Image (cartoon, helix red, strand yellow):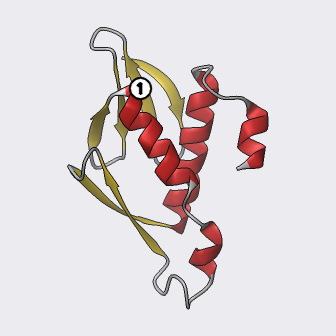
Amino acid sequence: MNVIYQSTYYTLYQDTKERCFFVDFGQKMVRMSLCQLLSLRQKVMSISIESHFDSDLNKHGFEVLMLCNKEHLFILNTFEILDLKKMVGQGFVAMGLSTESELVNT
């Protein structure tokens, strides 16, 4: 497996033999197809960080993230969400599927 991008909490790997990706969440390694990785990117980039600082919108500052047709469930705090956004964005840039300018616009 090749490391595509490593952040503080997460690591994104590509397995060329199985033609899939792995995301190491620290406590769990999740296998994903490209479509599932795209779905992860959509979910992560749609999370509003601003709501984590408004107690009326997000009282506890946690985010529940379900992946791969609800096979995996993660409860992430604000720091982990910020780091996951960075890992997903930079991972797609490293794979050549996105550009740096697209990260600024999200």
106 horizontally vs 95: left or right:
right
Indicate whether 98 appears above or below 48: above
36 horizontally vs 43: left or right:
left
Residue underneath mark 1: 13
Residue 57 or 76: which is nearer the viewer?
Answer: 57
Looking at the image, which residue sits at the far bottom? 56
Residue 77 visible in the current orientation: yes
Which residue is pictured at 45% across the width and 83% down the height? 60
Q: Provide the secondary structure element on which disc 1 rests.
A: strand
Q: Position of residue 26 (x, y in %)?
A: 35, 47
Which residue is pictured at 50% across the width and 43% down the height? 41
Indicate whether 75 appears above or below 69: below
Indicate whether 21 appears above or below 74: above
Identity of the amino acid at label 1? Tyr
Residue 74: quarter of image? bottom left
Q: Position of residue 98 (x, y in %)?
A: 65, 28
Q: Position of residue 59 (x, y in %)?
A: 48, 87
Q: Residues within 10 Å of mark 1 (few under 14, many from 20)?
A: many
Residue 22: quarter of image? top left
Q: Position of residue 82 (x, y in %)?
A: 58, 57
